[in-house]
Amino acid sequence: MIIVAFIKQYWNILQNDTNERILLLILVLSLSLRMWGIWNIEQTDEYNEVFEALKIDSGYLNYERWNKKVLVYILAVEYALYFGAGWLTGIFVSISDFASKIVIDMTPLFIIGRATSAIFGTAIVFVTYLIGKNLFDKKAGLVAASFLCFNLVHVEHSHLVLVDITMTLLLMLSFYFATCIMYEGKYRSYILAGIFAGLAIVAKIPSIFILISVGVAHVLYVRQYYVNKNNIVYNKSLIYLLFGLISGAILGNPAVLFALPKYLDWLKLLFGAYQGTADSVYYWTPLNGFIFYFISLIRNMGLPLLGLTIIGLLYFTVKSRKEILLLLSFVLPFFIFMAYSKWVLADRYMIPAFPFLSIIAGAVLLKIQEQFRIGRFLIIIMIGALLIIPIKNVVLFEISLLHQNTRYLAKDWIEYNIPSGSKILIDAGRTINTQSPPLINTKENIIAIIDKIENLQEGKTYDDSRIVDSKSAIYYKYLLENMPAITYDLNSTELGTNIKSVGYYRENGYNYIITSSDITWRIDNRKWAETFPESAVFYKSLSNEYIEIKKFEASMTRRGPTITIYKVS
């Protein structure tokens, strides 16, 4: 009855409020763009989150891998509900039956996680509207939401089981309550800003800069409304903020209570990863971070929209608006921190900045309309013009999800054309294959992997991902009990770092070599090639030494790495 009453009330609002109708249209479009194609997309790091969530469901919290816990706890709950629904409907007869089916085909788990990201991504668009409305007005919020709706990297990563979208939603919710603090200073806002900040920080450490925004909001409120303006630091409101922050951190990762020293060590490791690991051969780039991320802004917003945003930054800064000060209090230190990074440069790391930039762009566009008395029709034309590049990019991205990913297309071809049991060198990690076709290893190889995993010392992991540890053997044991008919004698290149000479594979009975552009792109990375010279020579000489029998490449309607299959002769 309550739901029906709410629907009726909202329907009445829609009938009488054009802004609400526009907002609903933006949100429906946002969700559609983010949901479409979640069955034909993937990213290597998705496996990290899915496997971690399954570990939690098995009762193991993995103290060796602390980051991104909020998302994996959400996934763990969703997977438990998925099992419950399957058990009630007879799809799964037991937990063992569930595990047996999942190790063969984990697609449902990825789809659940991707749908969650799509919903969270749409929620970010809505919160962006709320913040824009709070800081400026409804129209500014709507324009900001429309700009974010078509942000390419935001759309793309709202399709994936990665933590960036979850983190951004949490820090945006914290920022929303920071705007409430700035205008009203209610204790409730301090608590909620703290809770969501705590959740965001344990989700992913770069969101720690949201605390600056909450602090700035507090100072702005105290300076404007308190009689004793010097009483800024020592203030009862900050106790509520601290309570919320600690509560959010514990809620987001309860394990903090049981192993705080390990968590603090993990935080130091993460800051070192962003700022101190310049020698990482996997992520090294000769490009300066500030240049990289400025190009990223152009790539994802389009130059016209970015230009408008810069105009907005300059205009509101000159006008000394407290709203722009609050927005900049997060986006500026966040941008500098990420751009100063010695490595880990990627478009997705700038996702938290785009809602703030969209709000600034929306606000200045409405200010231009007001200043020059531009009519509604013309301002709609201007918004459309600013969105031409973002819409084109998003449409091309959506089209690329029409057909099956190259990895799975290659898998189908291999299992039809290459005899089961063939000895193959394949571009993959030490255990989990997330770069090449997801082929299944032979029974003998899986038994060997189980033996190595079970003999790991406490706290040690099988690979650098920190996912595969002594508790992971259960996955391979279930796989062993449910082996498919077609398996291969797979030998991994270990992300291209464990490769012998070209002649070695011919002399040792290998039948095929399968490479993936997710690995082979590194041969053009000078530092990587210097560190692994034999690997670089191997990849460059493949086409001359072996027969290329099949290649699967991405196209306008298909995503994925380039998979190349060579026959050893």
Image (spheres, rainbow, N blue to C red):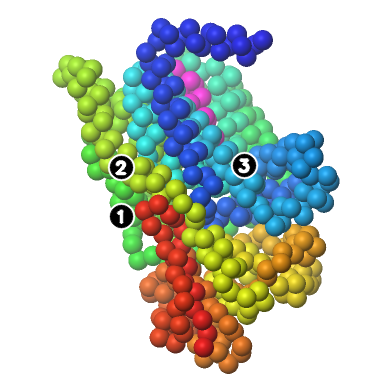
Contact between labelled residues 3 and 1, with CB atoms less than 8 Å apart: no
Q: Outermost residue toward the left? A: 372
**Which corner quadrant holds the N terminus?**
top right
Q: Nearer the viewer, residue 559 or 221?
A: 559
- Give how far apart the Cα atoms at labels 2 and 1 are: 24 Å
Q: Nearer the viewer, mark 1 or mark 3?
A: 3
Q: Mark 1 belongs to which amino acid?
A: Ile
Q: Quadrant of residue 328?
A: top left
In the image, which residues are magenta? 170-183
Q: Is residue 216 left or right of residue 494?
A: left
Q: Main secondary structure of the magenta part?
A: helix
Residue 103 in percent (x, y) is at 71, 56
Q: Earlier in the sequence, mark 2 or mark 1?
A: 1
Q: Nearer the viewer, residue 40 or 46?
A: 40
**Is residue 189 placed above or below 438 in the rendered structure?**
above
Residue 239 shows up from this direction: yes
Q: Is residue 151 left or right of residue 450?
A: left
What residue sits right under mark 3 in the picture? 112
Q: Mark 3 belongs to which amino acid?
A: Ile
The crowd level at tag 1 (other Cα within 10 Å; few <14, some 14-19, many 20+) is few
- Give how far apart the Cα atoms at labels 3 and 2 are: 28 Å
What residue sits right under mark 1 in the picture? 291
**Is residue 539 placed above or below 254 in the rendered structure?**
below
Residue 189 on the magenta span: no
Q: Earlier in the sequence, mark 3 or mark 2?
A: 3
**Residue at 46% over, 52% down:** 403
Q: Mark 2 belongs to which amino acid?
A: Lys
The crowd level at tag 3 (other Cα within 10 Å; few <14, some 14-19, many 20+) is some
